[in-house]
Amino acid sequence: MALHRFPAGFLWGVATSAQQIEGARNEGGRGDSIWDRFAAMPDTIEDGSRPDTTCDHYHRWREDLGRLRWLGVNAYRFSTGWSRILPTGHGAPNPAGLDFYDALVDELLASGIEPFLTLNHWDLPDALQQRGGWAARETARAFVAYAEVVARRLGDRVRFWTTHNEPWCIATLGHEEGSHAPGRRSPQEALRAAHHLLVSHGWAVEAIRGLVPAAQVGIVLNLSPAWPASPAEADRDAARQFDGFFNRWYLDPLLRGRYPADAVADRIRRGHLASADLPFVQDGDLDRVRAPLDYLGVNYYSRTVLAAGPDGLPKAVPAAPREELTEMGWEVYPDGLDEVLGRVTGEYGVRSVHITENGAAFVDPAPADGRIADPRRIAYLRDHLLAVHRAIAAGVPVHGYFAWSLLDNFEWGQGFTRRFGLYGVDFATGERTPKDSAFWYRDSIAARAVADGPESCIARRKP
């Protein structure tokens, strides 16, 4: 068994998001987000749950920071709640909301933990949705004003800034498929939303740098290698189509200043666009979208294997037996992370990468002796960290890794049925219980290294 050491200065972290852990829906002057409204609608959340309380992090954040200290992380990726800071999405800031994140940042820094702040992790204020949401260009302007409010308050202490988390999910799941908030089902709206997210990113990069000259500003994309299910031409084309709209629709504007021509042609064939003259793109937009990134955040969970459906559209197919998949139905495929990292740096020239989310949902047993056994999650984290180590050894500039997630939480459309946390959460009582993966991650961070064989969790003190 070999020990693979990581470079000095590497960021070891965990990630969360405001909507998924904070709760306190009606406290501290917070306004509703699109997820509060969406979860209150019938048949939108798998278990019927709502994020009204979730992990109650709003009241328990100090004890949760104690867990960060126990883990030994030197970075924490969190998001500010737009509707907690600007309850109607614009106008005068809510002092209580800003005070909450101000105290959080101060405590992180006092604990030697780097704040890694995300401005938009899907929780658009519902008041803005009622005015058109991301399908309306005005929302992009509102986002910049929100970014400026946060930067003015926290920019003297926060170095790492992320504009948006996974714009594909917001645009496609939220506006085309309707499985995420706001629950729209319009391909045309999805295309407009995707563009307005990218434009607002470019505008916000400029605004943040103007207020925080030393800021490191990036965006987080969920990326997945697209593999054909067979050598058949139809399946290879299905993989190309998926890659075009899942990966390249965001990578190409951000890093090349244009939308991929083949993916535009696919959308025209489907009737989603009238022509290659994209009606939502205004003069100068793509120059702004291409604002230089200080880093690219990569959220990686699995590859996607594609076959051509009866209608010729790409269809994801299982790549492993059901018992080998995670509870999200995703294949455990760490080699895909090598592939993604090689692509964004080799093909797109990205000069700094952070793995901003990586983790797995499994069915966890009940706690025993104050902890929860989760060997499959340990194996998942270990094998993906080894992929990161391989990439670094090959010269890929990966500077940080954030496990998803610190806590079991409100997992969007799956509610409380999917558990990714290093800590289990009893959503009735709020009690947190460390999983064996928390002990394993703590040991790895302490060693600044990962072993390539089965790893025992030798730490016994309950965090």
Image (tube, rainbow, N blue to C red):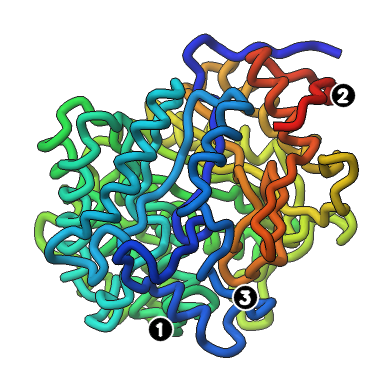
In the image, 51 versus 142, the foreground residue is 51
In the image, 168 versus 440, the foreground residue is 440
For the C terminus, which image quadrant? top right
Amino acid carrying label 2: it is Ser
Label 1 sits on residue: 186
Label 2 sits on residue: 456
Label 3 sits on residue: 49
Q: Residue at x 86, y 42 (%)?
A: 373
Quadrant location of residue 281?
bottom left
Nearer to us of marks 1 and 2 is 2
| Tag 2 near tag 3, CB within 8 Å | no
Please say whether residue 431 is visible from this viewpoint.
yes
Please say whether residue 398 is visible from this viewpoint.
no
Task: Name the element at disc 1.
Answer: loop
Task: Name the element at disc 2.
Answer: loop
> In terms of sequence position, does the residue under pointer 2 or pointer 3 come before the other?
3
- The residues tagged by marks 1 and 3 sit, at their Cα atoms, a distance apart of 26 Å
> In terms of sequence position, does the residue under pointer 1 or pointer 2 come before the other?
1
- The residues tagged by marks 1 and 2 sit, at their Cα atoms, a distance apart of 49 Å
- Residue 82: x and y in percent read 31, 60
Label 1 neighbour load within 10 Å: few <14, some 14-19, many 20+: some
> In terms of sequence position, does the residue under pointer 1 or pointer 3 come before the other?
3
